[in-house]
Amino acid sequence: MAAEPPPEFGTDWDDPRTAVPAIAKPPTASCTVQIVNERFDDFTPYTGTFTPPAECPGPWNKVVLRMEGKVQGVQYDRLGHLEVGGVTLFKTSTPEPSRDGISWAVEKDVTAYAPLLSQPRPVWMLIGNVVNDTYTGVLDVQVYLTFYRAHGRYKPADTADEVLPLTNPRREDTALLGEVTVPRNTERLVAEVYATGSGGGCEEFWYITAPANVPYSCPADEGPYREVQIEVDGKVAGIAMPFPHVYTGGWSNPFLWYVLPAPRAFDVRPIRYDLTPFAGLLTDGKPHQVKVTVLGVPAGRPGWDLPTNVLVWRDARSAQVTGGLLEHRVGAVSNESTHTVVDGWNHVDTQGNHHLRVTGYVRTSRGKVVTTVEQSVSNESLHRWQGDAENPDALTSTWNDSSTITVAGHGFFPTVSRSNKRYVLDGLISVTPENRLTTTITVSDLADERTTRGLFTLDQQKLSDVYTGEASYNLGVPRPQRNAVGISTHHYRLTGEHGDCYDRQISTRNGFVTEDVQRCDD
C-alpha cells in the first residue's frame, strides 16, 4: 500500500516513470556497451565511437537501448537527440527535476538498426541545456546498448539490410532536404522521420495556433492543421499526422508531469513511410532527392526538427531490381478554420484532411511484386478562449491517420497491412482572479493494426495509451508559496491477436504514486 501523499507538492517527489511495458528480452547470452556518458550543461554535443561487442558477435535476436538520467535543482524540460553513424536512433525529452533530485530511465527496442550496429560507428548526442545561477540542473546521462545473441528458437531478427541517413541534408524554410543513394538491388524501402515541434515557441504548441486574422497570441497563416509530408524526386510519397507531443513543462503546468509524462514524451517515435512503390525508380545507382515538409507552418517560423532515415531491403539474388510507378494520385489538401464569437468565447473550428494513393512495382528474382500504399489523414479541432487575456483557454482536437499497404506477388493472396491511428488532446487552462492557475488535460495515443493474407490474420494489435491529469498552483509567487496540488493517471493497454495482453495503470497525487496495478481483464 502506497504511503499517504502530502497535502501539496513539496521539494521532492517520486522518480518519473511510465506505464509502458519493459522491452521483452530473450534469455540468451548478452553483452552491454556504453555509448554515451555525459553531463549536459550547455549546447555542446557529446561525441564518441561505438564498437560492436566482440563477445557477442551477430546475428542478434534483439538489441535494446537504455538511457539513464539524473538531475537535481531547477531546470526546464529539454529535447534530446542521439545518432549513431549519422542515423537517428532515439529522440527524447527530459523530466523537470525536484530540488532534492530525480533519476529516470527509458528503454527502446532498436533491433531495426542492427545492420547499422554491426561495425564501429561515430556517436553523437545532444541534450541542449542552460545552466546558470537560476537554472541549476545538469543532466547526467548514460546510454547503453545491449545485444542479445540469436540462439535456438530465438532466431536472428528479421531486419532491413541497410539503414541510411540522408546525405547533404539542409534546411529550406519549413522543409528538410537531402539525398539518398540506394543499392541497385533494392526491393523495399521505408523512411523514418522523427518529427517534433519544439523549442518553446508557437510551433511547440502548433495545435493551438489560430489563423493570422484571429486575435490570438500564436498566429499561423491557416490555423493549426499540420501534416508531415515526404517527397521523392519531387513526387509526394507519403503523408502523416504529427503526434501532438506534450513535454514535461507543457500546458503552463509542470506539476502535471513531474512523475508521469504524457505519451511518447520520453520516447519520441518516428513516423514511418513505406516508399516501396518508388523503389524501382531509385535503383540506378544515382542520388535521389528526399524532401520532408511540415504543411501549415508559417514561412520562416522555426520550431520543427525532422531527422530522417531510410531503411533498405535488398534482393540478394539480383544484381539490379527495376520497376516503376503504376498509379500516383494525390488529393487536394482540405484545410478550413472558421472563427466565431459565442457568448464572449472565441471559437476556432478546424477541419482538415488529405488522401494519397500510390502503386508501384519491382521486378525481383522471385518475380514481379506490386505494392500499393493508400493513406488518409484528418484533423478536427475546436479551440475556445475568452478575451484578450485568453483565459480560459481550451482545446479539443482529434487526429486520424490511416494507411493500407497491399503487397501482391509473393504468393497466391496479397498481404494487406492496415493501420488506424487516432490521437486525442483535450485540455483547459484557466486562471482565477486570485492568480491561481489550473490545467486539466487528457492525451490519448490509440492504434489498431492488422496484417492479413487471404482469410488469415498474420498479426494484430490494439493500443490504448492514455494520460489524464489536473493540477493547480499560485502564479507569480516564490516556490514555497505556490501551494501546488495535482493528480494524474497513465493507463497503457496493449492487446494482440492471440489473447496477448498488457494492461498497467499508475496514478499519482501531489507527486507521489498512489496506485500501480497490472491487470488484463477481458
Image (tube, rainbow, N blue to C red):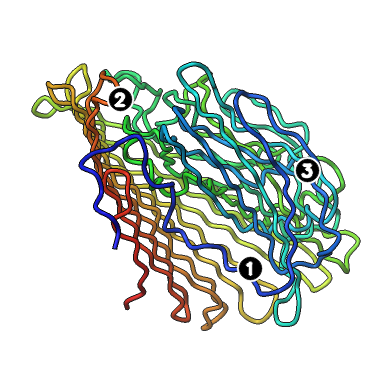
3D distance between C-alphas at marks 2 and 1: 58 Å
Question: Crowding near pointer 2: few (<14 within 10 Å), some, many (20+)?
Answer: some
Can residue 352 be seen here? The reply is yes
Task: Identify the residue shown where x is 22% and y is 31%.
Answer: 483
Tell me residue 269's x, y (percent).
54, 49
When the figure is inspected, residue 353 is found, relative to residue 130, above or below; the finding is: below
When the figure is inspected, residue 220 is found, relative to residue 278, above or below; the finding is: above
Tell me residue 167's x, y (percent).
78, 36
Can residue 346 be seen here? The reply is no
3D distance between C-alphas at marks 3 and 2: 44 Å
Tell me the kind of residue under disc 2.
Arg
Q: Which residue is mark 3?
A: 85
Q: Residue furthest left?
A: 343
SS assignment at label 3 = loop
When the figure is inspected, residue 23 is found, relative to residue 292, above or below; the finding is: below
SS assignment at label 1 = strand
For marks 1 and 3 on the same chain, the one whose residue lies earlier in the sequence: 3
**Mark number, residue 479:** 2
3D distance between C-alphas at marks 1 and 3: 31 Å
Count of numbered labels shown in the rendering = 3
Q: Which residue is mark 1?
A: 407
Tell me residue 154's x, y (percent).
70, 77
Q: Nearer the viewer, residue 292 or 159?
A: 159
Tell me the kind of residue under disc 3.
Gly
Give the foreground label among 2 and 1.
2
Tell me the kind of residue under disc 1.
Val
Task: Identify the residue shown where x is 73% and y is 45%.
Answer: 35
Question: Crowding near pointer 3: few (<14 within 10 Å), some, many (20+)?
Answer: some
Give the foreground label among 1 and 3.
3
Horizontal placement of 144 versus 364: left or right? left
